[in-house]
Amino acid sequence: MTLKIRADLGQLNRIREYVTERATELGIPSAVFDDLRLAVDEAVTNVLVHGYGGAGDLEIELRGHGPDLHIFLRDRAPPFDPVGNAPRDLVPPGDRESPGGFGIFLMQSAMDEILHRETRDGNELTLVKRGVLSTPASSHTPSSSGNHGN
């Protein structure tokens, strides 16, 4: 099931709820939920603040691939590859010129792999958490393009 939503920062709680609901449906251990929510929260915030500069259309899908979880985030913001633009050195908060800059680092810390590709309509970010599905055969639930909570 895919969450298609006109998102703004006020929708982050709804997005977190969707991630938790879908992870539960897939049988992912609850000990992993915080990592999933953190990574999605950071990715969505980056898209809304830096990509759209406010609200924008988002699609979020959690899907099993064997024992691994793939989280797909699709947006229509200008193309931006967070993986290729990850900070090389983390500067302590007191030494920074501006706040922020830890989102990509947090996503990388919470997930095992992050992939980006430009699409015809914008961006698709794939967040991968390896080995979290105990029954891979049941994790391959078909994707739904239904509207889940606009």
Image (tube, rainbow, N blue to C red):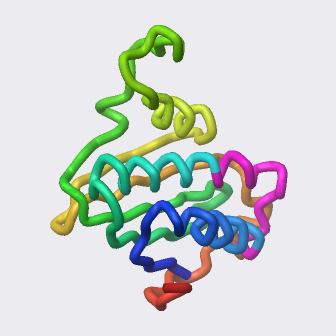
Q: Is residue 31 magenta?
A: yes
Percent of width and height locating residue 5: 44, 78
Residue placed furthest toward the top = 95
Residue situated in front as seen by the camera: 47 or 35: 47
The answer to whether 95 appears left or right of 112 in the picture is left
Residue situated in front as seen by the camera: 74 or 56: 56
Relative to 26, say whether 42 is above or below. above
- Image point 39% across, 53% down: which residue? 125
Relative to 52, say whether 1 is above or below. below
- Image point 43% across, 70% down: which residue? 7
Residue situated in front as seen by the camera: 81 or 129: 81
Q: Is residue 145 magenta?
A: no
- Image point 48% across, 69% down: which residue? 60
Percent of width and height locating residue 80: 25, 45
The answer to whether 121 appears left or right of 18 in the picture is left
**Tally of numbered discs:** 0
State which quadrant residue 85 falls in: top left
- Quarter in which the N terminus is drawn: bottom right
Residue situated in front as seen by the camera: 51 or 23: 51
State which quadrant residue 53 falls in: bottom left
Magenta residues span 25-37
Relative to 72, say whether 143 is above or below. below
- Image point 68% across, 46% down: which residue? 35
The secondary structure that dominates the magenta segment is helix
Percent of width and height locating residue 119: 22, 62
Percent of width and height locating residue 106: 56, 34
